[in-house]
Amino acid sequence: MTQVYYEDIEVGSEIPALVKYPTTMQLVKYAGASGDYYQIHYDKDFAVANGLPGVIVHGWLTLSFMGQMITDWLGDKGTLVKLSGSYRGMNKVHEDIICNGKIVKKYTEDGKNYARVEIWAENSQGEKTVTGAAVVMLPSRASTQ
Amino acid sequence: MSPDSVITEELNSLLNVEFGPEVYEIEKGMLKKFAEAIDDPNPRWLNEAPPTFPAALVPRALLHKLFNADIPLKRLLNGTSDLEYLKPIMDGDVISVTAKLTRLRQVAGAEGPTLFMFTEMTYTNQRGEVVVKGKNTYIKY
């Protein structure tokens, strides 16, 4: 994987998207790994009785996919400083979740190079189900010579 | 308290009370299980916690009180999550989590009242260094 440097990025450009396809089994694994056993994430009858269309993906799991998109892009030398997400819609199982990101700001502070990335996840109907932001610190080509 | 407020004395009494610390020993197996669950194959997560791992370091005492509060709203959704990373969480770390409810806000939704519960978490390692600061909003409706 090639390392991304501060000099290489431009405001307005998108970072590589990441597509995931969560299954009910993955939600059960996530429930076990995170300790979030709320039944709307694996018990369809419970979810429907709660007015949901079916089993829905944990917001935190979708945010995890968005986190992976960022750390995959950052490579070994970039650092994630902040990550946030607002859960606006539902992601259902057995549907693609498309994670996207766009650089909205680049700036230097205390000699360090930062970028702010707007991030969002879409369901297969094109609705934005999670929107958020990441702040990242990037290496500079100048300091690696 | 207005007659149709769902914010009870019980909930109000939790405001700005610090819960914890609850202590988690971070082991390789735990990191591996989490990375597998989120389907992130990056080998870095064999020793280091992936970004959303703090979700697994649950401040149980506070959340138990919030989720089981005796109010008429029974359905729960996660509203927002916000994480700030100061240091990495590594295999072998012992992380202490403290949590508090910082704000309650009731709004009139289309299907009735909706309650937003704003929480803040601090994750501190065995050297006393704050590694992550978190905020989470839960929605009862």
Image (spheres, coloured by chain):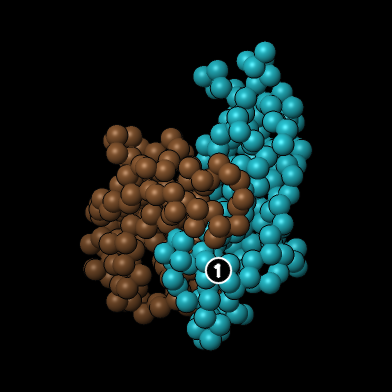
Percent position (x, y) of residue B33?
49, 57
SS type, badge 1:
helix
Q: Quadrant of the N terminus of chain B?
A: bottom left
Task: Classify A24 as above or below A7.
Answer: below
B137, A53: nearer the viewer: A53
Tally of numbered tags: 1
Percent position (x, y) of residue A37?
44, 71
* Residue A79, image quadrant: top right
Please name the residue that numbered disc 1 is placed on. Answer: A27
> Which one of the lettered chains is coloured cyan?
A
Q: Amino acid at mark 1?
A: Leu
Q: Going by the picture, which residue comes out furthest to the front?
A: B29
Which chain is indicated by disc 1?
A
Task: Name which residue lies at 60% across and 29% down.
Answer: A77
Colour displayed for chain B in the image of the structure: brown
Residue A92 in view here: no
Indicate left or right for A67 with B96 as reference: right
* Residue B75, image quadrant: bottom left
